[in-house]
Amino acid sequence: MHYPDFETRWLKSGGAERANYGLFLTDLCDLLGVARPDATTDDPAHDAYVLEQAVTFGNSGGKASTGRIDLYKRGCFVVPKKRNPGCAGSQGFREAEAPAPPAVA
């Protein structure tokens, strides 16, 4: 995929963030010339590069909650799928502080 094709496809994507983020991220991988994420398995220890990696967050009240990392690559990066609400007409994804990756035994 070349950038003009990527841009044309995603400028018209609209507000269906949840429905489109997996396609967006796989297109981004193609644009960057890197491998696409692997399919998620039943064993988080094997899920080194996946979409929707489950994580447990500890809350200040001592309770835990489960969340998801949109694109996770163990030891490398986390990509959130948040649009930039402060930029009129923005079709891009905003930078966000990434949580620490989950511990793997």
Image (spheres, grey):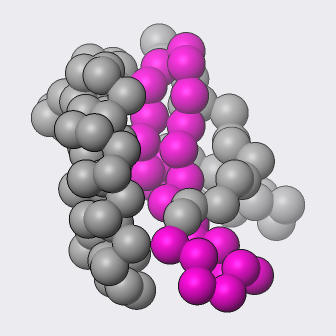
Return the residue nearer the eye: 82 or 45: 82
Residue stretch in magenta: 66-91
Q: Residue at x 71, y 53 (%)?
A: 96
**Is residue 57 left or right of 12 when viewed as pictured?**
right
Please identify the quarter of the rendering in which residue 32 is found: top left
Residue 37 against residue 82 in the figure, above or below: above
Q: List x then y, in percent, for residue 38.
A: 19, 29
Q: Residue at x 58, y 85 (%)?
A: 89
Q: Residue at x 54, y 64 (%)?
A: 92
Q: List x then y, in percent, for residue 69.
A: 48, 48
Q: How many marks?
A: 0
Return the residue nearer the eye: 10 or 52: 10
Residue 54 against residue 67 in the figure, above or below: above
Please identify the quarter of the rendering in which residue 48 is found: top left
| Viewer can see residue 60 | yes
Residue 82 against residue 89 in the figure, above or below: above
**Is residue 14 left or right of 79 when viewed as pictured?**
left
| Viewer can see residue 52 | no
Question: Which residue extends farthest right?
Answer: 60
Return the residue nearer the eye: 4 or 33: 4
- Residue 73 located within the stretch drawn in magenta: yes
Q: List x then y, in percent, for residue 18.
A: 34, 74
Quadrant the N terminus occupies: top left
- Residue 69 located within the stretch drawn in magenta: yes
Q: Residue at x 69, y 53 (%)?
A: 95
